[in-house]
Image (cartoon, rainbow, N blue to C red):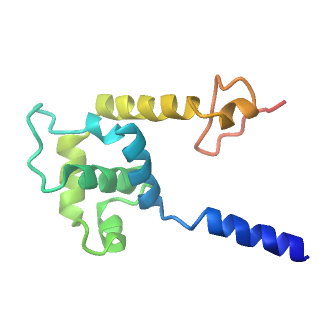
Amino acid sequence: MPSAQALEAALLDRMPERSLLDILANVNFWTQWVRHFGPLSGSEPKLADPRQRYILTAFTFCCNLGPTQAARHLQGLATAHELSFTNRRHVSVNQLDAAIKDLINAYHRCDLPKVWGSGSSAATDGTQIRSR
């Protein structure tokens, strides 16, 4: 299977392995979805690096790890207290909804969803949707 091995090598060369945190940061670069987060009071965040903290917080709670488990995996990027605090004080349901809308709209602008159908619906959580 030399052709299959060549294809695999070409794919690996063009699509290097990425971590989920790298992907979240990259998507934020293109969509700025973390701009919706911030202190619930409306003031400017007093965090050293708000963008990084919001990405780490999204990773923590969207993967359902919880702050203690995530802090262990993040190897010093944030403590459990920092992640929990950020989630409680800088993220609301309305802010999450706004960020999610940004991500859905960005996905809808891509060509790939239209290859699979009209692009009027999508499932990213493993939900099975009947396809044509």
Q: Quadrant of residue 42?
A: top left
Which of the image's four quarters has the N terminus? bottom right
x and y, in percent, of residue 76 in the image: 25, 73
Q: Position of residue 111 (x, y in %)?
A: 65, 34
Seen in the picture, residue 56 relative to 28 is either above or below; the reply is below
Measured from the top left, where is residue 104 in percent x and y?
A: 50, 31
Quadrant into which the C terminus falls: top right
Q: Residue at x 75, y 33 (%)?
A: 115
Q: Is 1 on the left or on the right of 105, as rendered?
A: right
Answer left or right for 53 relative to 44. Answer: right
Q: Position of residue 82 (x, y in %)?
A: 18, 59
Q: Is residue 109 above or below residue 25?
A: above
The residue shown at (24%, 57%) is 83
Q: In the displayed structure, does residue 54 sit left or right of residue 48?
A: right
Q: Is residue 86 above or below residue 12?
A: above
60 or 11, which is in the foreground? 11
Q: How many marks?
A: 0
Relative depth, front residue between 22 and 64: 22
